[in-house]
Amino acid sequence: MRHIDPKEHPVAHVHQILLGGVAPRPIALVSTLDGEGNSNVSPFSFYNAFGANPPIVVVSPAFRGSDGTPKHTFLNILETSEFAVSAVTFDMVEQISLASSDYPRGTDEFVKAGFTKLPSVRIAPPGVAESPFVLECRLMQHVGTGDRPASGNLLIGEVVMIHVRESAFTDDTLDPRRLDLVARMGGTWYCRANGEALFQLPKPRHNGIGFDALPAHLLESAVLSGNDLGTLAGVATLPDVSAIREKWKTDLQRLGGGPALPDLFSVELRADNPRGALLLLFADIKGGISPPRRIAGRLQRCAQAFLRAGDIDRAWECALMSDEREIASLREG
Ligand SMILES: Cc1cc2nc3c(=O)[nH]c(=O)nc-3n(C[C@H](O)[C@H](O)[C@H](O)COP(=O)(O)O)c2cc1C
């Protein structure tokens, strides 16, 4: 571990470390008007939503790191108390990068960056029509966190109107595959929330038993990952090991004798066939071929494969039977 005390490092370094580790960050493309009605649009990734009742967003235009001067977005919001936030999609990245240029105050950055104005309903500043998701916001509170270069400003805004492109919905829910949003990482990295980067994780429906209820041989496993253990620890009750033991003993008795099966265990797992792999292990357990330690490791690999296939019951069976003492007991019959 590298330990970084912010007070002992140059501000630019601390900034880069934060940008790299507090990531991926959503990007707010913030549009504002100055007191004379000139429009401005710039991206800010120190941004997020906080609460829905009322719906709140915070954007943070910092004082410029180079000379400590305020950003035009900051000045405009303090002057007019209104801003629009447009979400950024992959199709917009080059334009938002251009909009982040330091044009003189009063320059219409919609024109510079080639964006189209989307008229707002409740506030004066327009949103960005190229975006599928636009929030109209009114300044609720400004919290300054310092007056030195790179100090942040929290501009807390209440969302007073939301515009979402119809094609972004699947049923009544915003569909990330239809939005194609991008986020900011550290350095020059961005990421695109689409394709293989997206995955689903259902919300827990009950309190899981927790890691502290997992048997020691699973916690010490060299095979099962934190995610595997997390799934196992998410069940509502610890499965009954004696019932599984008896079931497996019956299954083993049913398994006929015959020539030893070829050791195709890894082949079956690679083919996403944990049932086939488990059948081979049964023959191995019954035949007393491999040492219990090896069987235990293989049972955990089966457990892992069942987890990936969404079969939590089978995964738990393999996990509980992967204790070397259980394997010895199965062999005794
Ligand atoms: C993706 C991206 C995210 C940014 N995030 C921030 C931010 O959170 N805070 C900030 O002060 N500047 C941020 N910037 C830099 C501003 O966009 C830049 O300073 C811009 O010139 C400000 O424009 P303005 O003076 O017209 O408000 C970001 C730039 C990019 C490209």
Image: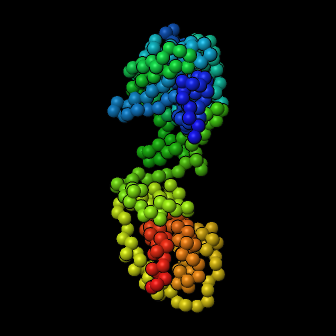
Number of numbered discs overlaid on the protein picture: 0
Q: Position of residue 256 (x, y in %)?
A: 52, 89
* Left-right relation of 101 to 7: right
Residue 118 image point, x, y percent: 52, 26
Nearest to the observer: residue 247 or residue 58: 247
Residue 84: image location, x then y, percent: 48, 24
- In the image, residue 105 sits, relative to residue 197, either above or below, namely above
Tell which of 72 and 270 is nearer to you: 270
> Residue at point 44% right, 63% down?
216
The quarter in which the C terminus is drawn is bottom left
Q: Quadrant of residue 188?
A: top right
- Residue at image position (62%, 36%) is 190
**Residue 72 appears in the picture as rendered:** no
Q: Position of residue 305 (x, y in %)?
A: 54, 65
**Closer to us: 264 or 172:** 264
Q: Quadrant of the N terminus?
A: top right
Q: Identify the residue shown where x is 60% and y is 13%.
A: 67
Q: Say if residue 253 shows up in the picture.
A: yes
Q: Is residue 15 above or below residue 200?
A: above
Left or right placement of residue 101 versus residue 251 in this view: right
Name the residue furthest top. Answer: 36
User: Compared to 303, does 246 lie above or below?
Assistant: below
Between residue 160 and residue 232, name the one nearer to us: 232
Residue shown at the point (35%, 63%) measured from the top left: 237
Q: Colour scheme in the image?
A: rainbow
